[in-house]
């Protein structure tokens, strides 16, 4: 897939073949797959639609499905034939790869390719909500109630406190991005997170998100480096739970015991004895956990077929209770509608790691 994404624009892609379980079903095709140009904004709208539809499908059916498998389900409903499905998938992913500088495009690709767990998407959504909540708190303390406006000096102080784990270089990058978006000293901070008509965010929002994404990728890469270095020195071709725990502690000394157990648990589950797993399997499972009630593309399609015409009550309830803002969605779209007082918002989901470690 990386070769496809890095290919220079041509009239067609070469399909990744069929039958290889390592190739997602949505990409399994032989021969030529013809290139069809997609605008970045259209690709991003499709990505937002896929995330939303996947969330609703999982809530309605009480199952989990990988992003790669759900992409097949989503495109099957739109295109029907295997050839058209694959053509749409190759062209969508190629377009996202061409715009990987954009956090929405890059995040979708990283999750699709198994380089990040899907919880990275939830963490990015929580990032926006958390920063806005912190800014509103500073605003309320400074002005007796939120006004939507803050001095840059107050914002810089809040960012240093909120992101205490970031380096001075990262913070200065955020401050420069803030200056780029808002040259004046007084800032309408809600506008920093708005999308334009092409679904681009401002420099500040995109810098914040890209830093967050890079931190997560760097976290796993540091662990992988220790695992592979240890395996090379010992001549091992597998990794035990103890060896993975050692790698996690060495790469990230600030991890709590609870975090260590969470990461080793996603790889080994309850089987944490001396028997190891192949290195590739270990590293793949570390990056992307296997959620409970996971179904593949075929089973997901059966659920779609069985539920045609039925109201998705669980999905509707999930939408009604959701208060966390997602990227590409403004507050009016996210806010639940009610005839009475709105319930208090639930706690913002915890980021995968503490601020003192890459998240």
Image (spheres, helix red, strand yellow):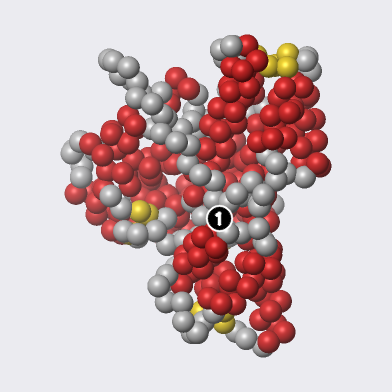
- Outermost residue toward the bottom in this view: 235
How many numbered circles does the render carry? 1
Q: In this view, does 330 lie to the left or right of 295?
A: right
At a point 67% along the width and 88% down the height, the residue shown is: 235
Residue 167 place in picture, x, y as percent: 77, 45
Residue 257 picture location, percent across and down:
55, 63
Q: Could you tell me which quadrant the N terminus lies in?
A: bottom right
Relative to 30, 186 lies left or right: right
Q: Residue at x 51, y 82 (%)?
A: 276
Q: Which residue is drawn at 70% across and 41% down?
A: 164
Question: Quarter of the image holding residue 208?
Answer: top right
**Among the 4 quarters of the image, the one containing residue 165:** top right
Sort mark 1 into few (<14), some (14-19) or many (20+) by Cα contacts within 10 Å.
many
Q: Please, is residue 52 above or below residue 4 in the view?
A: above
Q: In this view, does 146 lie above or below 282?
A: above
Task: Please say whether residue 11 is visible from this viewpoint.
Answer: no
Instruction: Indicate the quadrant where residue 293 lies.
Output: bottom left
Residue 337 at least partly seen: yes
Residue carrying label 1: 116
Label 1: which secondary element: loop
Task: Name the one closer to the observer, 60 or 259.
Answer: 259
**On screen, 307 above or below 172?**
below
As drawn, 296 above or below 307: below
The residue closer to the viewer here, 358 or 304, is 358
Image coordinates of residue 79 in percent, x first then y, are: 37, 45
Q: Which residue is drawn at 52% across and 73% down?
A: 281
Residue 352 coordinates in the image, percent (x, y): 54, 50
């Amino acid at each position: 897939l990386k070769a496809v994404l890095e290919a220079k624009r041509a009239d067609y892609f070469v399909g990744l073949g069929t039958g290889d379980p390592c190739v997602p079903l949505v990409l399994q095709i032989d021969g030529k797959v013809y290139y069809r140009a997609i605008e970045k904004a259209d690709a991003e709208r499709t990505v937002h639609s896929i995330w939303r539809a996947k969330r609703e499908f999982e809530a309605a059916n009480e199952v989990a499905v990988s992003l790669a498998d759900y992409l097949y389900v989503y495109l099957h409903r739109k295109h029907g034939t295997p050839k058209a499905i694959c053509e749409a998938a190759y062209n969508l992913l190629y377009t996202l790869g061409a715009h990987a500088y954009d956090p929405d495009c890059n995040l979708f690709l990283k999750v699709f390719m198994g380089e990040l767990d899907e919880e990275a998407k939830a963490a990015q959504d929580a990032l926006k909500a958390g920063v806005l909540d912190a800014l509103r708190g500073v605003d309320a303390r400074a002005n007796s109630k939120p006004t939507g406006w803050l001095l840059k000096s107050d914002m810089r102080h809040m960012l240093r406190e909120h992101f205490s784990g970031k380096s001075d270089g990262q913070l200065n990058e955020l401050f420069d991005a803030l200056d780029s978006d808002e040259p004046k000293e007084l800032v309408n901070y809600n506008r920093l997170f708005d999308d334009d008509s092409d679904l681009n965010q401002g420099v500040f929002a995109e810098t914040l998100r890209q830093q967050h994404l890079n931190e997560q990728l760097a976290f796993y890469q540091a662990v992988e480096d220790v695992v592979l270095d240890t395996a090379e020195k010992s001549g091992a071709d597998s990794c035990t739970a103890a060896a993975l725990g050692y790698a996690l502690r060495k790469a990230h000394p600030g991890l709590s015991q609870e975090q260590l157990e969470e990461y080793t648990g996603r790889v080994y589950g309850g089987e944490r004895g001396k028997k190891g797993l192949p290195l590739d399997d270990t590293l793949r499972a570390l990056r992307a956990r296997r959620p409970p009630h996971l179904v593949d593309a075929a089973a997901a399609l059966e659920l779609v077929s069985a539920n045609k015409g039925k109201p998705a009550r669980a999905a509707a309830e999930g939408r009604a209770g959701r208060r966390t803002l997602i990227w590409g969605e403004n507050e009016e779209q996210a806010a639940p509608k009610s005839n009475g007082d709105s319930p208090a918002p639930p706690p913002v989901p915890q980021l995968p790691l503490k601020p003192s470690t890459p998240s």
